[in-house]
Image (cartoon, rainbow, N blue to C red):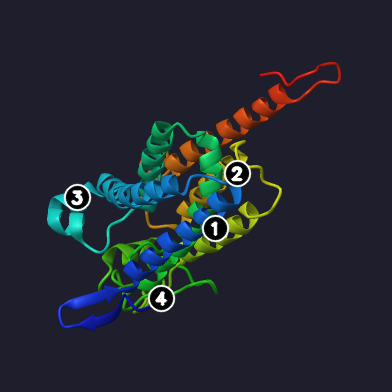
Amino acid sequence: MHPILFQYGPIRIGSYGVLLALAFLAAIFFTNREFRKNGADPALAWDIYLLAIVGGLVGSRILYIIELPEQFLRAPLATLFGSTGFSVIGGYVLAFGLCWWRVHAAGEPFFRTADLTAPGMSAGYAVGRLGCIAAGDGCYGIPTFSACAMHFPNGLVPTLSAKNHLLTSYFLRLFPGHPVPVDIGVHPTPLYESISHFILLGILLLPFWRAGSGRRLAFFFCWFGVSRFLVEFIRLNPPSWLGLTSDQWLSIAIFAVGSAVFIRAASGASQTSVSPGSSAPVS
């Protein structure tokens, strides 16, 4: 892995930052594509991009601090302004809230606008998770000897047993009596999520989706919730309540919201359908 791509004197260009920028560009590309195809306001799209960037960066940092307060108390400035220390799901929650406020303030139909942004959100997430792999920033999973195992000896948070005591403790707990490797293989969980969201992107770009019903947004939420909930079982995040991590509880909430939007969309479709004896849709 290559956490630092280029360095010129004190200036360093990190792989995570580059892929994060590419993630935003991917999100912009697919969102612009959907807005143009459906005749939506491009100015609103740019407002959404700005709020998504701010909300994504701030929200991911806030949730990271909530999950690991001891890290913040030990080194507050490094935690606030360092190149690591992000919880992506927190960024999504805050970014979504800010974008909802902007769409509502513009008087635009929320579910139509959200449907148009769903492919962009999926593309951005898929590319962004590759940044975690390239940088080896500690978002990887638990130790494993499977064929999927990856090693990050030069990562921002290396998998070397001598430098990563948390990972070493997980290894000893999972494989008691087994000698600890110099470089511990781990589940590349960001890669699993990236593959999952590239598949989701392909599904969201299929032509049968009708913008405005909220179904595409709902499908994104449900897929995201299930995908993140499952991958958390093989991540290093410690359980917070009832054996589940804080991200798993957030995933359950996101899935519940997606299910509610699906129910709303189905209810709206049934209410607006024209019965054989009626002369106009029911409003």
| Residue at (50, 35) in percent of width and height | 110
Residue type at mark 3: give it. Glu
Q: On the image, numbered disc 4 is attached to which residue?
A: 151
- Mark 1 or 3, closer to the camera: 1
Q: Residue 203, located in which quarter of the rendered image?
A: bottom right
Cα gap from disc 2 to disc 3, whole angstroms: 39 Å
Q: On the image, numbered disc 2 is attached to which residue?
A: 216
Cα gap from disc 1 to disc 3, whole angstroms: 32 Å
Cα gap from disc 4 to disc 1, whole angstroms: 23 Å
Left or right: 194 in relation to 10: right
- Mark 1 or 2, closer to the camera: 2
Mark 2 / mark 3, whichever is N-terminal: 3
- Mark 4 or 2, closer to the camera: 2
Q: Secondary structure at mark 2?
A: helix
Residue 85 visible here: yes
Cα gap from disc 4 to disc 2, whole angstroms: 36 Å
Front-lying residue, 230 or 23: 23
Percent coordinates x, y for residue 142 in the rendering: 42, 62
Quarter of the N terminus within the rendering: bottom left
- Mark 3: few, some, or many residues within 10 Å (few <14, many ≥20)? few
- Mark 4 or 1, closer to the camera: 1
Residue type at mark 1: give it. His
Q: On the image, numbered disc 1 is attached to which residue?
A: 197
| Residue at (43, 43) in percent of width and height | 244
Q: Secondary structure at mark 1?
A: helix
Left or right: 63 in relation to 176: left
Asked if 146 appears above or below 200 in the picture, the reply is: below
